Image (cartoon, rainbow, N blue to C red):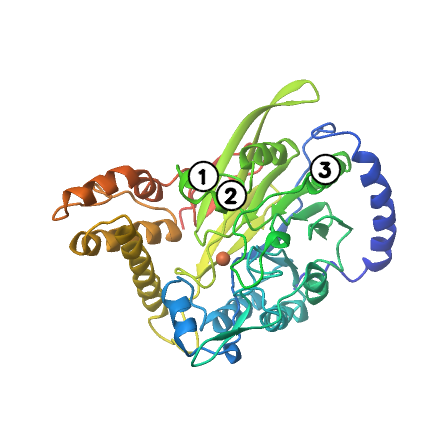
Amino acid sequence: MRMHSGVWSLRRVLMLSLLILIVVLASTTGPFASFGKAAVYPQTRFAVISDPHVFDVSLGTEGPVFQEHLISDRKLLIQSRELLEAAVSELCNEDLDFVIVAGDLTKDGERINHELCASILSRLIESGIAVYVVPGNHDILNGYAMSFTSTGASPVASVTPEEFAEIYAKMGYEQAIVRDSASLSYVVEPVPGLWLVAMDACRYRENAPEATSVVGGRFSEDTLKWLDSVMNLATSSGKALLGVMHHGVVEHYKGQQRFFGDFLVEDWKLIAERFAASGMKVVFTGHYHAQDITKAAFTTDIGGKKRNVFIFDVETGALVTYPCPYRVVEITEDQVMHIRSHFIAEIPSHPAGFQEYAKEYVHSGLTRIAYETLRKYRVNERSAEILAPQVADAFIAHYSGDEVTPKVTIDTSGTALWAKLVVWVQRGLINGLWNDLEPADNDIDIDLSTGSWTVPSN
Ligand SMILES: [Fe+2]
């Protein structure tokens, strides 16, 4: 395994003191002020996991409340532990510098689930691979943290932001060269010359007791100022930038803002442009449980000059949702980022046919959700039965990535006139899910110098 961290302790203390001073000074310069010569990305190899939603089955898997939760959701919660353990054991055998986890580490922020998640991830650290996590919308101060019994559910402890940073101290917060005082964002230098900006836009402080967590994401003004100062400093120090956060910064299909706006960070267009202008060429995200990469390009004013900049939002699907992926990413000397996707093929409880099982599991869950949504729109039973599986097909195509648009995205034959009208009004969602925005989603080589990309032949 590559080892870079052993000699960093003293250097980190010195860097931290220096950085605190410089960040304070840099924060007065404003966004994009220090754009200069593009930094060179150092060679590195790392992996990305997102949305493992770990659930310790000792919290209970029986009873009407848990069953209703499971049936109306799309997550393989009961298998979540096995899935993360499978991903971690595969990654322990890879030659990696670090692994990043893009949030939603737990089902609903339960302390016991965080402790289980951290203990599984710590096996990577024991194998010499650093781990860096960020929180997702489910992870902190979650009023929906519950244990389940045969008759109902009762609240269990969630975690505060401070407790989150303690539990994952060795997975980012202890190694951070600088932290944001207004959020759980931080910066690490996993390999010399590369700054990984781990960002927290989750709105856990707005969560209500005994209610599901706020889904949307927003950076506070203080965190935006901190991000600007950190990125300005990275540029002036010649550090190459990568980002990781839970919420998306670029629409992953046409209409995502309209239909599922909470899966994009608030002001995402402006945020993406700020990141791109600051030299962050790739941000790794999660949240929507889909394998999707989207590129955004801007002509932006930097230091009084118009410059063409770009950013790739590399969204990684959920480990607990078909196709149960993770990504291995390598940056080579020629400044190409090679992204390869892997899918969990088996877990102990499903030694064969796991992918088929996972696909059917999410398809039936999505069909149920779609059926109930159509019924709320007063679509009759027969029409809803015809349409719901097709809606599920569209979501699964998007979750899998590299969608191939069919000739007919939704066939309304045999449905009532009202159902046809509802489909017509909502056609933007189905067409959006089926029409993959460039570039490719699963395996891709991105030229970090130019923003061009190719699909590898094998
Ligand atoms: Fe999630």
The reply to whether discs 3 and 2 touch (Cβ–Cβ < 8 Å) is: no
- Mark 2 residue element: loop
Tell me residue 65's x, y (percent).
Answer: 42, 72
Residue type beneath disc 1? Gln
Name which of mark 1 and mark 2 comes first in the sequence.
Answer: 1
Element under disc 3: helix
- The tag earlier along the polypeptide, 3 or 2, is 3
Circle 2 residue: 264
Q: Percent x, y for residue 217?
A: 57, 46
Cα separation, mark 3 vs mark 2, equals 20 Å
Callout 1 secondary element: helix
Position of 214 with respect to 167 (left or right) is left
Q: Quadrant of residue 156?
A: bottom right
Where 452 sits versus 308, above or below? below
Q: As shown in the figure, which amino acid type bears the numbered disc 3?
A: Lys
Which residue position is annotated with label 3? 225
Callouts 1 and 2 close, C-beta under 8 Å? yes
Residue at 52 percent across and 65 percent down: it is 107
Question: Where residue 151 appears, x then y in whole percent?
Answer: 43, 80
Along the line of sight, the residue nearer the viewer: 127 or 299: 299
Give the numbered dot on residue 257.
1
